[in-house]
Amino acid sequence: MENRKVKIIADSTCDLSPEQIAENNISIIPLCIVLEDKSYFDLEEITPDEIYQWADENKKMPKTAAISIEHAVKLIQTFRKENEDIIFIGISEGMSTTCNVMRLASQMMEEGRVFVIDSMNLSTGIGLQVLKAAQMAREGRTAEEIVKEIEAARGRVRASFVVDTLTYLARGGRCSGVTALLASALKLHPRINVVNGNMEVGTKYRGSLSRAMKQYLEDLKDELLQAEEEIVFITHSGIDEEILAQVKEYLEGLDYFKEIVITRAGGVISSHCGPGTLGVLFYVK
């Protein structure tokens, strides 16, 4: 029997570029950014820079929310009409209810096959898995084969970020205001690692953000040289072009990766981390 076509869907926190989304026939479900009593679809109705402006003017942290079940059902129905199997890869269930919303939406359908994968990650830590799934779908692999392989490999994703300021994390209650002030006074730039689907604070780099990035890259070097060569992501929430160029130049200097892709984080990641955040994300072998 001929394999059914497989459609790959992700949420907007995967932070893939518009070109990657189009080239790989991926559909994106936007999460929601909530400013006071009004909700906006991430990237469709509001940009990270607009979020920063609102947050700084109001000295508040935007709230983020999963999609509604109604929105999820509507999207699923679109591809059910095409008689496609659907695989949804979403932000870690340790950080959002999005995957569960997709499961509930799929249960409301009378027929059709919808598979939900908890990426146990965020940002392009999800994006790496989405691209791998899309490639397998193009190769004609079944939904079951894709799900099995993506879930087996998700522990090999390495996702970490260096944060310029703790102000946004403090506003969101993820660290204390005193800690944020102290970090600012001491010029500390914490490294945030994604471990088992949750964010953990790692090394705290001291000095300028440029110096912190150099130390971060040196700390990553051994893992980078054990990575899958196909692709590495540089994902940022809005950062000085010189620092971005510095990070790209370092990765190019390793002469290891076939493709180095720079992407800008969407509203959800930016809301929590604030501007000046940058991460290098990849699969290890």
Image (cartoon, grey):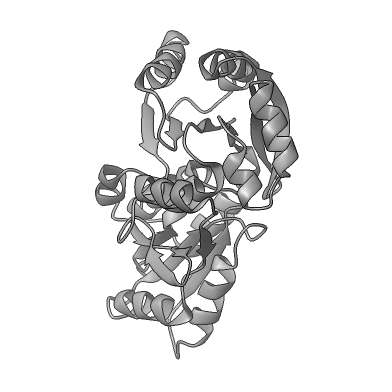
Q: In this rendering, would 18 be left or right of 257?
A: left
| Whole-percent x, y for residue 63 in the image | 53, 61
Q: Which residue is rendered at x = 48% and y = 67% of the image?
A: 36
For residue 53, say whether it is visible: yes
- The C terminus, quarter of image: top right
Q: Is residue 50 above or below residue 256?
A: below
For residue 130, say whether it is visible: no
Q: Which residue is rendered at x = 32% and y = 43% of the image?
A: 17
Q: Is residue 131 above or below residue 275?
A: below
Q: Which residue is rendered at x = 25% and y = 47% of the image?
A: 23
Q: Nearer the viewer, residue 226 or 143?
A: 226
| Whole-percent x, y for residue 135 in the image | 38, 47
| Whole-percent x, y for residue 16 in the image | 38, 45
Q: Is residue 250 above or below residue 53?
A: above
Q: In this rendering, would 122 be left or right of 27?
A: right
Q: In this rendering, would 179 be left or right of 153?
A: right
